[in-house]
Image (tube, rainbow, N blue to C red):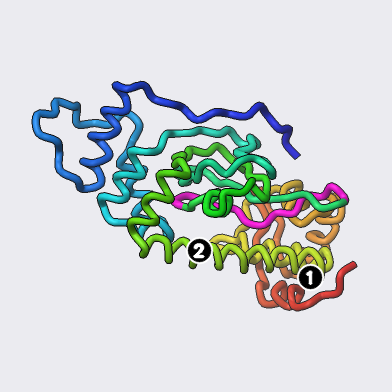
Amino acid sequence: MPGVLPRTEAFVPDSAVLELLTWAGGRLCGMPRPQGSGMPTVPVNSLDQVCAALRASEVLGRLSPEGAAALARAGSPLELPAGRLLCQAGDPGDAVYVVLEGEIEVRTASRGGREVRFVALGKGALVGEMAVLDGGPRSTDMAATRRCRLWRIPRSALLTRLEAEPAAAVGLLVELVGRLRKTNAALEAQTTLDLGGRLARLLLAEQNARGLVAISQTELARRIGASREKVNRKLKEWSAAGEIAVTTAGVRVVAPDRLAELTQGAAHG
């Protein structure tokens, strides 16, 4: 497990930059340019990408152009290197984050100290919304699995938008239900599936269109709460049986149907 590095605070722009953000956010999200503005035409921190991410989001994509612009203007950029914690369980839920680049992993630790990975959220995803909605502390840890660029939106700005645009609030409710289902599935896998079942489930979930899982064996082991040695032995067993192929690029799923059979209620052990 990578070491926990010092916490990174979000960048807070000065008044001149805020003026630029206000103008650029409105222009890029479809709002008219203020009369007499002499602002440059290229925003320095790619607010066009922020607005595109907001429009593509399953939750915030239901916002009006004006609402998306308001959130873009209210936010600020945040970058995290791989392995850096975004927040820990118990931290105040004072903001949500839109993933512009990279991946954020939501996880917790079991009583035995073993990490349980709930979900990984990639480009366009909204992160940290639960604590923002109820005003409570964070319930899980969230960390960057690789270098991340995020857009931090304060709690007050998000709540104002959701109150003004109920369609976005409904979208957020749908997203929360989906996250809950995924969390339940992850917990069920940890308690009802043996190592082979958990590993098969992970490989099927992470394979690309060509069946390749470009994740190291060390990371595979971490995600399912097992040792690398046990994962390596299981992969060798499946490779000999023709169910997978271990390559320099990662693990290639050859027989997905046979792996899927291992995820159907295998006994825990």
Q: Residue furthest right?
A: 269
Q: Give the side of residue 179 with respect to residue 235, left or right.
A: left
Q: Is the N terminus in the top left, top right, bottom left or bottom right quadrant?
A: top right
Q: Nearer the viewer, residue 8 or 48?
A: 8
Disc 1 is placed on an element classified as loop
| Residue at the image point whose x is 25% and y is 50% from the top | 66
**Residue position marked by numbered label 1 in the rendering:** 241
Q: Position of residue 54 (x, y in %)?
A: 37, 51
Magenta stretch holds residue 266: no
Residue 240 visible in the snapshot: no
Neighbourhood count class around disc 1 (C-alpha, 10 Å): few under 14, some 14–19, many 20 upward: few
Report the residue at 61% width, 36% height from top: 82
Residue 194 appears left or right of 8: right
- Left/right placement of residue 145 relative to residue 123 reads right
Do the CB atoms of the residues marked 2 and 1 lie less than 8 Å apart? no
Tell me if residue 18 comes above or below residue 143 in the rendering.
Answer: above
Cα separation, mark 2 vs mark 1, equals 39 Å
Say which amino acid is labelled 1.
Ala
Residue drawn at x 69%, y 62% is 202
Numbered disc total: 2
Q: Does dot 2 land on a helix, a strand or a loop?
A: helix
> Where's residue 238, x and y in %?
78, 66
Q: Mark 2 sits on what residue? A: 175
Relative height, residue 9 to residue 55 (above, below):
above
Q: Which residues are magenta?
A: 112-124
First of labels 2, 1 by sequence position:
2
Of all residues, the one furthest to the left in this rendering is 36
